[in-house]
């Protein structure tokens, strides 16, 4: 088993939701707590990228074996690539799983499938309904170094970044073997998304 660093992106403004998605409740736990518990299974290091007080995040990690560190974004509320780049200096492992608080369901078997398929590629990018899914997937640390270079040039787009690195695209039929409802890639961005999620899961 490869040593994996997980970066949890928890620093968004959640404008469409109206409240911080990291702390939305599901089955008596916050989204962030669910994510931390799931990534703790396969991670040897966990980093939370956030813009609030450190203790707010750490209280969600009481039962986590690999105690997270919290890193504040270089440019708060400037998008997910900013959060990823902000964590670069703290990443100890060569393989990095990037999780987002938009989707509280992480499937361990999907992550292992990604690990089996990354090979010499710099990242794995699922495609669902023809759309790239650049989060809740794995990258090599060298790809995040590339993101840092792009970010310094003013590039803030995740999609521009993945176009600049050597990625392997995975289609939804392959993902459905391990995640039949593709819950790992179902973003929860609005109150109606949240209500639908609570109803369906």
Image: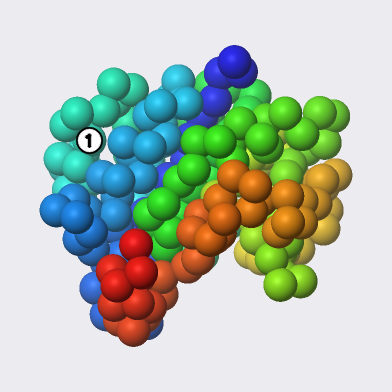
The furthest residue to the top:
1
Residue 179 relative to residue 172: left or right = left
Q: Residue at x 32, y 31 (%)?
A: 68
Q: Where is the N terminus found, in terms of image quarters?
A: top right
The answer to which of 57 and 21 lies nearer the viewer is: 21
The image shows residue 67, relative to residue 110, as above or below, that is: above
Q: Dot 1: few (<14), some (14–19), or many (≥20) neighbours within 10 Å?
A: many
Tell me where residue 6 appears, x and y as whole percent: 48, 35
- Which image quadrant for residue 109? top right
The answer to which of 174 and 46 lies nearer the viewer is: 174
SS for callout 1: helix
Residue 171 relative to residue 68: left or right = right
The answer to which of 33 and 56 lies nearer the viewer is: 33
Q: Where is the C terminus found, in terms of image quarters?
A: bottom left
Name the residue beneath numbered marker 1. 61
The answer to which of 12 and 193 lies nearer the viewer is: 193
Tell me where residue 33 appears, x and y as whole percent: 26, 45
Residue 178 relative to residue 126: left or right = left
Q: Residue at x 28, y 69 (%)?
A: 198
């Amino acid at each position: 088993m490869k040593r994996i660093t997980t970066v949890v992106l928890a620093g968004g403004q959640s404008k469409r939701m109206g409240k911080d998605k990291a702390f939305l409740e599901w089955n008596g736990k916050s989204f962030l707590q669910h994510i931390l518990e799931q990534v703790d299974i396969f991670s040897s290091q966990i980093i939370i990228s956030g813009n609030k007080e450190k203790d707010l995040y750490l209280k969600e990690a009481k039962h986590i074996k690999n105690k997270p560190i919290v890193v504040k974004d270089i440019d708060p509320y400037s998008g997910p690539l900013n959060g990823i780049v902000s964590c670069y200096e703290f990443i100890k492992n060569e393989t990095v799983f990037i999780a987002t608080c938009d989707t509280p369901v992480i499937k361990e078997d999907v992550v292992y499938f990604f690990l089996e398929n990354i090979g010499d590629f710099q990242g794995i990018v699922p495609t669902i309904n023809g759309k790239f899914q650049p989060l809740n997937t794995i990258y090599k640390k060298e790809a995040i170094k590339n993101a840092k270079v792009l970010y310094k040039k003013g590039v803030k787009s995740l999609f521009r970044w993945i176009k600049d690195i050597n990625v392997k695209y995975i289609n939804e039929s392959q993902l459905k073997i391990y995640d039949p409802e593709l819950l790992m890639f179902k973003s929860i961005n609005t109150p109606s998304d949240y209500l639908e999620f609570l109803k369906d899961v």
